[in-house]
Amino acid sequence: MTTPAPNPTIRRLDVASPVPADIDIANAVEPLHIADIAAELGVPPEHYDLYGKYKAKVLLSVLDKLQGQQDGYYVVVGGITPTPLGEGKSTTTVGLCQALGAFLDKKVVTCVRQPSQGPTFGIKGGAAGGGYSQVIPMDEFNLHMTGDIHAITAANNLLAAAIDTRIFHEASQSDKALFNRLCPANKEGKRRFADVMLRRLIKLGISKTDPDELTPEEVRRFARLDIDPASITWRRVMDVNDRFLRKITVGQGPDEKGMVRETGFDISVASEIMAVLALTTSLADMRERLGRMVIGNSKAGEPVTADDLGLGGALTVLMKDAIHPTLMQTLEGTPVLVHAGPFANIAHGNSSIVADKIALKLVGKGGFVVTEAGFGADIGTEKFMDIKCRYSGLTPQCAIIVATIRALKMHGGGPDVVAGKPLDHAYVSENVTLVEAGCVNLAKHISNTKGYGVNVVVAINKFATDTDAEMEVVKKAAMAAGAFDAVVCSHHAHGGKGAVDLGVAVQRACESQAEPLKFLYPLDSSIKEKIESIAKFYGASGVEYSEQAEKQIEMYTKQGFSNLPICMAKTQYSFSHVPSMKGAPSDFVLPIRDVRASIGAGFIYPLVGTMSTMPGLPTRPCFYEIDIDTATGKVMGLS
Amino acid sequence: MTTPAPNPTIRRLDVASPVPADIDIANAVEPLHIADIAAELGVPPEHYDLYGKYKAKVLLSVLDKLQGQQDGYYVVVGGITPTPLGEGKSTTTVGLCQALGAFLDKKVVTCVRQPSQGPTFGIKGGAAGGGYSQVIPMDEFNLHMTGDIHAITAANNLLAAAIDTRIFHEASQSDKALFNRLCPANKEGKRRFADVMLRRLIKLGISKTDPDELTPEEVRRFARLDIDPASITWRRVMDVNDRFLRKITVGQGPDEKGMVRETGFDISVASEIMAVLALTTSLADMRERLGRMVIGNSKAGEPVTADDLGLGGALTVLMKDAIHPTLMQTLEGTPVLVHAGPFANIAHGNSSIVADKIALKLVGKGGFVVTEAGFGADIGTEKFMDIKCRYSGLTPQCAIIVATIRALKMHGGGPDVVAGKPLDHAYVSENVTLVEAGCVNLAKHISNTKGYGVNVVVAINKFATDTDAEMEVVKKAAMAAGAFDAVVCSHHAHGGKGAVDLGVAVQRACESQAEPLKFLYPLDSSIKEKIESIAKFYGASGVEYSEQAEKQIEMYTKQGFSNLPICMAKTQYSFSHVPSMKGAPSDFVLPIRDVRASIGAGFIYPLVGTMSTMPGLPTRPCFYEIDIDTATGKVMGLS
């Protein structure tokens, strides 16, 4: 039995059982032309640019047009502490939107992150949801998309090249020669400062604008960045899983005259520029953030920025198209905005502010924007609230916590869950005791999230082997912990239809929400006070700082960066720093190994343990199966 | 006085004198929507994909639709041996097309290369023609365009990561473990080969298709590529001028267990994948070329290919959009196809075969396709004929040689021309004697090019300081050397109107051309015989091979690659290997320092001297002036 479609772009799915492979489901559906999706959503043609038939960049200019419009409801999707297999947060995000748009007749936009190409060809495969809850076309979502990550790679590496080359040129030139090259005389013998140079002059407290008026001392201060090579934190990036680039030595060519240096590559989505893109609010704001990114210190200990290197403008030019979110569609024809994909540990793991802002205006009053926060709620939702919402000024009306019986059993004492190995019997047959014991993890995520003053809805992402008794236990535990509602859903198997109850619960939660957002910490606390607030939120009994961490905190405080929010780089597999501590541990002291900063993006990130920022390839990477049908042009083997 | 526009997309220019800066000319014109250009050219909407408002990818599918159509005239633009300032070959290519399309009422398509982003932010600036003969929008042409170079970077580096990781995994695993990981058993305990693995089995002469049937010896041969690290020729790439990556050591991280290796990065346009893109003729052909790219040898001396590493399909998937050329427009509204941009020394320096093929069908009988060949005619035109036309099967009706009074004076004995330094007096005042003496260079390019059996038209690209007497000398010398015609043109100052005489001459040349194309050498000669034919064509008295070159020639011959065409890697600043030997030298022996191969692209490239494949940044790179007007989104400071 099918209900009549509420709008012309809605597509009804014929679902099969058992659920076919993701790529087969995706390939079986002919996507609508994205212009149809845009029209239905109310984006006029002058406010988007097509990128082929199924993708369009929605231009920020649409925000001016929609200025008077009221915002829709804002829903964030987090999860309990996951197993290494993932608990279906993306799938739930997509499935809920399919329910709201295709079955509950609501205006809705899904806001998700752009995946890195590294995992697509490596181990994990793509990231467009799963089963009957997916973003399509799957290949366009996972490959290149509209080039945003490529733009980040280009910008990141231009800055890296500029750093090493500047050190090289400063090493061989006198102050005067350097200055003459930086401000060359034109045919009439006249010099001028480039606009970006005026920023450096202001920073140095030099109020002159005519190069010829600088004293030799001012010439030296202006022209010589005097970068301390040991202090450089800016690394090169590549959107490929290339473990052999984790640590490298550069500058070994004969022309570089022995100026070798140890450095390395991260995967592109770990670039600070990705975090800037996710947190920026306008083109002008992005220009400022990119310019103030700190790449290291001068030998005197002053932070050196992209603008000091003359690059803030050029980086913005490279990123000028990337700032516009990309419109795509779900399997059921509801609109999706894909934008940014910062790491969820060394960065804040949420899709972009501008996409959410545009979406909230487009759906308008009574509509819904559902956005996903990476990792468990201790990381993703915390950063969503304390970093993303702080910068955007937006307030969510509902926070979803996705739970699975599988992960709850693990928290209740079930055996290890390891990717690539068969699941233990405990996970595929009823075991109410394990589920019950595991609900401490869910309960802590609920109470933590409620602390922000927002209604919490638990989405129980049902697998075929889960039993009613198991789910009943979870519902009860959730309500006891203060959830607004707890709902079983089956969108993976049934598409939006499987998440209608969740949609109804979310709607009720949004409509009954009135409280303002309560941040976990005020910005004007000290760096240590802020770290300690978050540690307490995790359940830690205290915090321990390494010598290096103490040194860095002192330095950032001295440099005037202590009023930034904190972005904790912690494992997603436990509330604590120890992945094996499941449930809701409280008997741990959180160790802060090091403290780093993304000044342009706008946060300090303490490292709790070692974070890998460049994945590797296994012996048999996904790419073995990926090919193209050269007759039809169809991509095969994407997973 | 303006003539009426022959078709609705033609735009009349108001030219100013002196000629304003390129970016100011480009910004003063409102480009037409690219759908209008496509419509006028006869590309139906189902055969192109929009990328914003001013760019569209013309899909190869249009070739099927146009199958019955006759080809237009095919014109290649080469040049005399240039000064370091360049002699306006791109500008002439664009200006000629503006003349043919906007003043002579011809159907015309300009085919040009996509520029690298490295120089755009480095020294040289962008590359969209100049003055009143440009491709617009200039910023979209120079930045990202439709992402083709980014796709090449991604594909090149995925292959690089796969090489090092494969060596790493082979080092620590037994034959059996390796095989079990490459062909894992599924839930039913069944193994299968991925499609790409079947290619390796065929190469090894193993006709089995069931993994369980391989003997231990076959398992070893299949699973162990046994790459000799010292033989690896595949380098990583980046579209940034990053000199510190020219020579690096990778693998220094603790997890890579001491498997360090010296290697380096090239600029992306130097990737073999760029050469493949330029020389491919279809998606199926690209799949084969990418799969057979050789990355190095096994320890037994067998070539190891991308398909051996399991990557031919995945690389094609990464390149599936890049294979479609990008439609843009000139200042006067004529269509341009931008596609590929291989290096002109270590590769063949010509834009793509597929773009030319599409263009020839689109203009049809009586129409014109004008395509540029990089560097002087000794390199660009030679490779156009002997490599590009050999692979495409196309025959040009006219070859243009662009000459400037400036460069001819240099060849006649004028002082050095150095970029960034003021020109000597000889170059900005009349000096007929120098011009006359320099014409030996032009004459040799003419007779060389005529040798292919094609009509040669000399385009004298007029500068403001050139005199009538100087130009008269050039015309006479050109006709004496056998040119079909020699024409003065001023398209830089006047747009298409300044190249109308050139357009008329080109039309006459095309209409009177009947000879078939005569290649310089047959493919079945030995590698040395082919090298010697080209050396003779340069004017060399002989060829000298280094020990290394001899060794490589022997190896490639043994490996079965001796029937490929030759792509000489030689300086563009002389017919010889010595940049300071101007004019038409004949008293030199061409030294072959080394010989390399791009097997996937399909050529052997002997190195005559040292070729830099990674430029650097100067003290004050172009990026200092590049910024964005955050209110309007307009890019400023591109040069």
Image (tube, coloured by chain):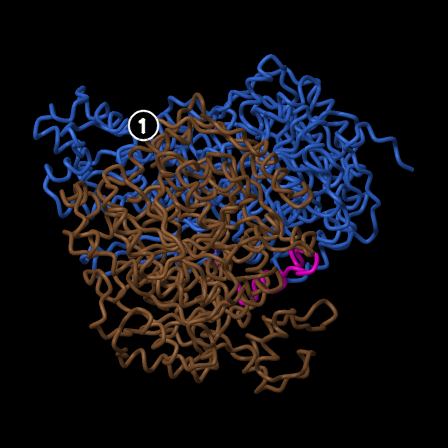
Chain colours: A blue, B brown
Position of B300 with respect to A21 (left or right) is left
Give the position of the C terminus of chain A as an image quadrant. Answer: bottom right
Position of B519 with respect to A110 (left or right) is left
Whether B386 is among the magenta residues is no
Label 1 crowding class (10 Å Cα cut-off): few <14, some 14-19, many 20+? few
x and y percentages locating residue B58 in the rendered image? 60, 47
Q: Nearer the viewer, residue B88 or A560?
A: B88
Q: Residue at the far top: name it.
A: A68
Whether A627 is among the magenta residues is yes
x and y percentages locating residue A426 in the rendered image? 72, 56
At label 1, the amino acid type is Ser
From the viewer's perspective, is residue A392 above or below residue B569? above
Q: Is residue A529 visible?
A: no
x and y percentages locating residue A97 in the rendered image? 71, 33
At x 71%, y 37%, the residue is A33
Q: Nearer the viewer, residue A582 or B66?
A: B66
Magenta highlight range: A615-639
Q: Chain of mark 1?
A: B
Q: Nearer the viewer, residue B13 or B34?
A: B13
| Element marked by disc 1 | loop
SS assignment for the magenta stretch, majority: loop
Q: Which residue is mark 1?
A: B17
x and y percentages locating residue B257 in the rendered image? 38, 67
From the viewer's perspective, is residue B561 above or below residue A12? below
Quadrant of res A477: top right
Q: Nearer the viewer, residue A349 or B470?
A: B470
Position of B622 with respect to A218 (left or right) is right
Give the position of the N terminus of chain A as an image quadrant. Answer: top right
Q: Is residue B434 visible?
A: yes
